[in-house]
Structures are given as structure tokens and as C-alpha cells.
């Protein structure tokens, strides 16, 4: 490895090239995801809701329940909570 001004050129070049390859792969994957959402939209699915479902599936159950409880609390505080059926 060459050492110029305290920087290992070969190692630096390797890092940069790896990052560039990964960035290209990320762009390709991002484009593929956009295509899937477009396909879902073409089949009548709401992509905003679909994105929310994907986001929720990434969370563990406890985290999701906590967020839902906080959302319910906020909605109640703003008078936006859904009316509960009366027995």
C-alpha cells in the first residue's frame, strides 16, 4: 500500500469504490421498490396505507402498541377519538 500524506491510498480507494458500488445497488433496489408500489397502485391499492403497513411490520409488537396508545391519547385530547359504541 502506498502512503501519501498519511493516507493509505489503496485502502482509501477500496473504501470509495465499495461505497460507490453499494450506492448503485441501493439506487437499483430503490427503483425496484418504486416499481412494486406503482404496480400495487395500478391494482387499486392505496400506496400511502401500504407504506404504513410496511412500516408497522418493521416494528415489534410492544413498540407498535405503545405508539397506538399515544396516538389514541393525542386524538382524545384533540376531541378526535372515534366514538365507542354504546351498549
Image (tube, rainbow, N blue to C red):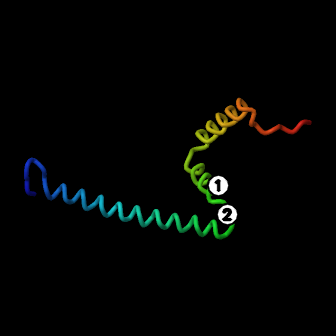
Residue 1 position, x and y percent, is: 10, 57
Residue 48 position, x and y percent, is: 62, 55
Left or right? Give the position of 49 relative to 59.
right
**Across the whole image, how many numbered discs are drawn on residues?**
2
Q: Looking at the image, which is closer to me, 81 or 60? A: 81
Q: Is residue 70 above or below residue 16?
A: above
Which part of the image, by quadrant, shows the C terminus?
Answer: top right
Q: Residue furthest right?
A: 87
Numbered disc 1: secondary structure: helix
Left or right? Give the position of 16 relative to 30.
left
Give the residue at mark 2: 45
- Which residue is drawn at the image coordinates 19% and 55% (left, top)? 12
Q: Which mark is residue 61?
A: none
Residue 75 position, x and y percent, is: 70, 35
Quarter of image, res 54: bottom right
Quarter of image, res 9: bottom left
Left or right? Give the position of 42 relative to 8.
right
Numbered disc 2: secondary structure: loop
Q: Mark 1: give few (<14), some (14-19) or many (20+) Cα within 10 Å.
A: few
Quarter of image, res 86: top right
Residue 71 position, x and y percent, is: 66, 37
- Which residue is drawn at the image coordinates 62% and 53% (left, top)? 53
- Which residue is drawn at the image coordinates 62% and 66% (left, top)? 40
Q: Mark 2: give few (<14), some (14-19) or many (20+) Cα within 10 Å.
A: few
Spatial separation of the CA atoms under disc 2 and disc 1: 8 Å
Contact between labelled residues 1 and 2, with CB atoms less than 8 Å apart:
yes
Q: Is residue 68 above or below residue 6?
A: above
Give the residue at mark 1: 49
- Which residue is drawn at the image coordinates 60% and 39% (left, top)? 62
Amino acid at each position: 500500500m502506498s502512503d501519501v500524506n498519511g493516507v493509505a491510498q489503496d485502502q482509501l480507494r477500496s473504501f470509495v469504490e465499495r461505497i460507490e458500488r453499494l450506492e448503485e445497488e441501493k439506487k437499483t433496489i430503490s427503483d425496484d421498490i418504486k416499481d412494486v408500489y406503482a404496480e400495487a397502485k395500478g391494482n387499486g391499492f392505496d400506496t400511502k396505507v401500504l407504506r404504513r403497513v410496511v412500516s408497522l411490520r418493521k416494528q415489534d409488537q410492544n413498540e407498535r402498541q405503545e405508539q397506538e396508545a399515544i396516538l389514541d391519547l393525542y386524538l382524545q385530547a384533540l376531541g378526535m377519538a372515534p366514538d365507542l359504541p354504546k351498549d
